[in-house]
C-alpha cells in the first residue's frame, strides 16, 4: 500500500508538471498581448515597455514559467490582468455557486441513474427497458445548449415562479429572511439548470449502469448463487450490484473536476455566477492568469479524482488490492 501511494504521488507530480508546461506554452501562443489589457489604449511604447518589465513579461519564457510556477506552488496564482484582483480570490468568490449547482445535479443523477439502469438491465427488453433506452439516447443526442434554450422558451418564459437568469433575487435583504424563503428563491433559479444537467448526466450513467449490470448478471457466480437457493434480492444487492458499480466508480473520479469547474455552457446560458462563467469571460477577455489558474486547478482536481476512484474500488470490491 505504501509503495502504491508513493508511486501514484510521483505520477501525479509528473502529470501536473507536464500540464503546467503545456498550459503556459498555450497561453504564450495565444493571440493578443497581455500588455494591451494592462496599459491604456493610448500608452506609448516606453510606457508599455515599463509595464512589461514591471510584470516580468520581458524575461525569457523559461524564466517567466519558473516565476509563475514557483508562485503557484505557494498558492499564489497572480492577479487578473482585467480586474487586478487576486485570481484565487476571484475563483473562491464564485466557487460556492458552482459547487451548489453541480453537487445537487450529481446527487440527482446518481440517485436516479443507478437504480434505473439496474432495473432496466434486470428487465431487459421489457417496455421499461425500451423506454429507458430511448430516453437515454435522447438525452445523449440533445445538445445541452439547445435543451436549455428550449426549456427557457417553453417553461421559463411561461411560468412565473421559475427564473431563467442569475442565482437569487436582487434587492432583497436575505439576512432577515427565513430559511424557507431563501430556499424557495434559490429553487426558482436552480430548477432549469438542474433539469438540463441532470437529464444530460443521467443519460450516460444509466447506459453505463445497464451495460455493467447486464454483464454481471450473466456471470457464473450469479448462476451459482441462484443454484444455491439465495433470494433474488440478496443476489442482486450483495453480489451483482457491487460488482456492477465498478465502472460507475471510475466515472465518479471524473466528477470531482466537474464539481470545481462547473458546466460552462449551462452557467453561461442561465447567467449562473459560478466559476464556469468566469472561465468563459476570462477566455474572451484574454485574461491569461485566470485561464492558467483554471487549467492547473482543473488538472489537480482530475488527478485527485482518479486517485479517489482507485480508493473507492477497495470499498466496492474488497478483492482488489492496491499494490
Image (cartoon, rainbow, N blue to C red):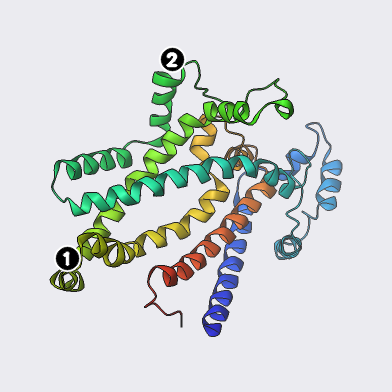
| Among the two numbered marks 1 and 2 on one chain, the one whose residue lies closer to the N terminus | 2
In the picture, measured across the screen, residue 2 lies left or right of residue 214, that is right
Which residue is at the front of the view, 131 or 66?
131
Which residue is at the front of the view, 276 or 304?
304
Q: Label 1's element?
A: loop
Vertical order, 250 against 266 (above or below): below
Q: So how many labels did they put on this image?
A: 2
Which residue is at the front of the view, 33 or 315?
315
In the picture, measured across the screen, residue 52 lies left or right of residue 34, that is right
Kindly indicate the quadrant of the structure image that contains residue 246.
bottom left
Mark 1 or mark 2: which is in front?
1
Instruction: Check disc 1 and report the residue beneath it.
Output: 218
Residue at image position (64%, 44%) is 95
Q: Which mark is residue 133?
A: none
Residue 29, position as x, y percentages in the image? 60, 52
Residue at image position (45%, 16%) is 159
Residue 258, position as x, y percentages in the image? 51, 50
Q: Evaluate whether residue 166 shows in this view.
A: no
Q: Evaluate whether residue 305 shows in this view.
A: yes
Vertical order, 39 against 303 (above or below): above
Instruction: Check disc 2 and report the residue beneath it.
Output: 158
Vertical order, 83 against 162 (above or below): below
In the picture, measured across the screen, residue 40 lies left or right of residue 123, that is right
Residue at image position (43%, 72%) is 314
Q: CA distance from mark 1 to mark 2?
A: 49 Å
Residue 252, position as x, y percentages in the image? 44, 57
Residue 71, position as x, y percentages in the image? 76, 61
Amino acid at each position: 500500500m505504501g509503495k502504491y501511494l508513493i508511486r501514484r504521488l510521483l505520477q501525479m507530480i509528473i502529470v501536473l508538471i507536464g500540464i503546467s508546461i503545456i498550459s503556459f506554452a498555450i497561453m504564450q501562443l495565444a493571440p493578443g498581448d497581455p500588455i494591451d489589457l494592462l496599459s491604456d489604449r493610448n500608452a506609448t511604447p516606453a510606457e508599455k515597455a515599463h509595464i512589461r518589465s514591471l510584470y516580468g513579461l520581458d524575461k525569457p519564457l523559461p524564466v517567466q514559467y519558473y516565476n509563475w510556477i514557483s508562485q503557484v506552488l505557494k498558492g499564489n496564482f497572480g492577479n487578473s490582468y482585467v480586474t487586478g484582483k487576486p485570481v484565487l480570490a476571484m475563483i473562491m468568490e464564485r466557487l460556492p455557486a458552482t459547487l451548489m449547482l453541480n453537487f445537487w445535479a450529481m446527487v440527482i443523477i446518481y440517485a436516479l441513474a443507478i437504480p434505473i439502469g439496474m432495473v432496466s438491465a434486470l428487465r431487459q427488453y421489457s417496455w421499461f427497458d425500451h423506454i429507458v433506452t430511448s430516453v437515454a439516447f435522447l438525452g445523449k443526442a440533445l445538445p445541452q445548449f439547445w435543451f436549455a434554450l428550449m426549456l427557457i422558451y417553453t417553461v421559463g418564459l411561461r411560468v412565473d415562479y421559475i427564473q431563467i437568469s442569475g442565482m437569487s433575487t436582487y434587492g432583497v435583504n436575505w439576512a432577515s429572511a427565513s430559511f424557507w424563503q431563501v430556499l424557495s428563491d434559490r429553487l426558482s433559479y436552480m430548477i432549469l439548470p438542474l433539469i438540463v444537467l441532470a437529464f444530460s448526466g443521467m443519460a450516460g450513467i444509466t447506459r453505463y449502469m445497464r451495460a455493467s449490470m447486464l454483464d454481471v448478471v450473466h456471470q457464473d457466480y450469479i448462476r451459482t448463487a441462484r443454484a444455491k437457493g439465495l433470494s433474488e434480492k440478496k443476489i442482486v444487492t450483495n453480489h451483482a450490484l457491487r460488482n456492477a458499480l465498478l465502472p460507475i466508480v471510475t466515472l465518479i473520479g471524473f466528477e470531482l473536476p466537474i464539481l470545481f469547474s462547473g458546466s460552462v455552457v449551462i452557467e453561461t446560458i442561465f447567467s449562473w455566477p459560478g466559476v464556469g462563467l468566469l472561465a468563459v469571460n476570462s477566455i474572451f477577455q484574454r485574461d491569461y492568469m485566470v485561464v492558467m489558474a483554471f487549467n492547473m486547478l482543473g488538472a489537480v482536481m482530475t488527478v485527485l479524482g482518479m486517485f479517489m476512484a482507485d480508493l473507492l474500488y477497495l470499498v466496492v470490491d474488497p478483492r482488489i488490492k492496491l499494490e
